[in-house]
Image (tube, helix red, strand yellow):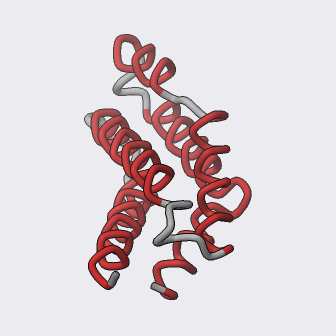
């Protein structure tokens, strides 16, 4: 059972690392590739968490609450099309980079998703 919690803890840490990478970007040329990579990692980790949470091993209300927030995020937010459009036309535009980065960060804070992830990381 401890191994499962360590696995979840590692995933939560990686989500926070990717989030912090997005927070600390300076909106310069080349950052769009970093934004794309980090949002893909985050969404991949969200999919893993949705698949793992709610199983017999993770049935606490905290985990189920996080699972519903992750599912909401995956169903309601997608930035791939905008990033692809930007990469072809505006990958060096500092203002557009800042805008997409801030929109992604705003989406991660919707329903206090990142707060919930940080809380569970401390709890696990």
At 45% across and 84% down in the image, what residue appears?
A: 124
At 64% across and 57% down in the image, what residue appears?
A: 109
Image quadrant where residue 10 sits: bottom left
Which of 27/124 is in front?
Answer: 124
Q: Indicate whether 100 appears above or below 109.
A: above
Q: How many numbered marks are there?
A: 0
Q: Position of residue 107 (x, y in %)?
A: 63, 46
Q: Indicate whether 116 appears above or below 54.
A: below
Image quadrant where residue 75 sits: top right
Q: In this rendering, would 85 be left or right of 38?
A: right
Q: Position of residue 118 (x, y in %)?
A: 52, 76
Q: Residue furthest right?
A: 111
At 53% across and 35% down in the image, what residue appears?
A: 100
Q: Position of residue 78 (x, y in %)?
A: 55, 30
At 67% across and 44% down in the image, what residue appears?
A: 72
Q: In this rendering, would 46 be left or right of 68?
A: left
Q: Position of residue 91 (x, y in %)?
A: 36, 24
Q: Quadrant of the N terminus?
A: bottom left
Which of 33/58 is in front?
Answer: 58
Q: In this rendering, would 66 be left or right of 20?
A: right
Q: Indicate whether 39 appears above or below 122.
A: above
């Amino acid at each position: 059972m401890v191994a499962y919690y360590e696995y979840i803890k590692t995933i939560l840490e990686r989500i926070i690392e990717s989030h912090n990478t997005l927070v600390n970007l300076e909106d310069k040329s080349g950052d769009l590739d970093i934004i794309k990579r980090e949002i893909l990692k985050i969404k991949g980790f969200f999919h893993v968490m949705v698949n793992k949470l709610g199983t017999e091993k993770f049935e606490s209300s905290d985990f189920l609450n996080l699972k519903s927030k992750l599912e909401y995020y995956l169903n309601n937010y997608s930035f791939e099309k905008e990033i692809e459009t930007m990469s072809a036309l505006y990958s060096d535009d500092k203002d557009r980079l800042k805008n997409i980065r801030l929109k992604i960060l705003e989406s991660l804070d919707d329903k206090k998703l990142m707060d919930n992830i940080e809380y569970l990381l401390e709890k696990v």
